[in-house]
């Protein structure tokens, strides 16, 4: 399985880039699936911990074995995990979102992308997309993701670093 990770701060355009890559590969006949990290996080407070690394390893190992991949599905409305989704292993898997480029995925990632954006601009983008009511949670999230990126050395480990468009 060919693995692409797309990581970087909130609002940098990771989901948009993942969608462009996904549709380009699918249009050429490639078997491709995109996993959004939002589905894997255990809520706001427990998102970037050891459990996420464990889940990512399980997903990658299942895909590399060629069998079905079981993907947890976090429900943000109920603040709990629902029934997991099971898919056939694609030839290309895209992991998209904060934490996708962490050390647990690096040895298996064929392409590691980092999208960068100033924190203030990222906050503006996310609030425009998701709503002002998330401001306090997002400010805390930005601190958590910065700590995660520093701890994991995510940006330096990327194969390609891209400045996000204004």
Image (spheres, rainbow, N blue to C red):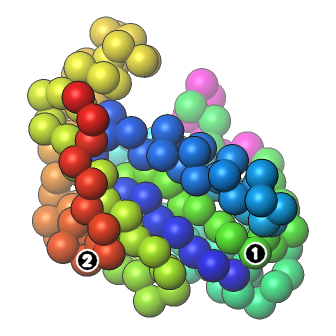
Residue 99 is at least partly visible in this image: no
Q: Position of residue 59 (x, y in %)?
A: 65, 73
The disc at residue 140 is: none
Side of 121 where 66 appears, left or right: right
- To which quarter of the image does residue 107 belong? bottom left
Residue at x 68%, y 70% (from the top left corner): 92
Q: Are marks 2 and 1 in contact (CB under 8 Å)?
A: no
Residue at x 13%, y 38% (from the top left corner): 118
- Sequence order check, earlier mark of 2 and 1: 1
Q: Nearer the viewer, residue 28 or 89?
A: 28
Reply above or below: 4 against 132.
Answer: below
What secondary structure prevails in the magenta region?
A: loop
Residue stretch rendered in magenta on the structure? 77-82
> Mark 2 packing: few (<14 Cα in 10 Å), some, or many (20+)?
some
Reply above or below: 133 against 24.
Answer: above
Residue 3 is at least partly visible in this image: yes
Q: Nearer the viewer, residue 77 or 11?
A: 11
Side of 164 where 17 appears, left or right: right
Secondary structure type for disc 1: loop
| Quadrant (top left, top right, bottom left, bottom right) of the C terminus | top left
Side of 83 where 139 appears, left or right: left
- To which quarter of the image does residue 99 belong? bottom left
Reply above or below: 150 against 66.
Answer: above
- To which quarter of the image does residue 62 belong? bottom right
> In the rendered structure, does residue 88 fall within the stretch colored magenta?
no
Q: Position of residue 101 (x, y in %)?
A: 38, 68
Secondary structure type for disc 2: helix
Q: For mark 2, what is the residue?
A: 157
Q: For mark 1, what is the residue?
A: 91
């Amino acid at each position: 399985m060919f693995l692409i990770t797309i990581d970087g701060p909130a609002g940098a355009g990771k989901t948009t880039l993942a969608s462009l890559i996904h549709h380009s590969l699918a249009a050429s006949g490639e078997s491709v699936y995109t996993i959004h990290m939002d589905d894997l996080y255990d809520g706001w407070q427990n998102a970037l911990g050891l459990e996420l690394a464990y889940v990512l390893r399980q997903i990658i190992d299942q895909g590399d074995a060629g069998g079905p991949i079981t993907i947890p599905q976090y429900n943000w409305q109920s603040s709990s995990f629902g029934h997991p989704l099971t898919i056939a292993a694609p030839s290309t898997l895209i992991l998209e979102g904060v934490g996708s480029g962490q050390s647990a995925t690096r040895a298996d990632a064929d392409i590691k992308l980092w999208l960068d954006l100033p924190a203030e601009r990222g906050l503006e983008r996310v609030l425009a997309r998701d709503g002002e009511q998330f401001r306090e949670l997002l400010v805390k999230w930005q601190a958590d993701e910065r700590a995660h990126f520093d701890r994991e050395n995510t940006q330096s480990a990327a194969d390609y670093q891209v400045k996000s468009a204004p």
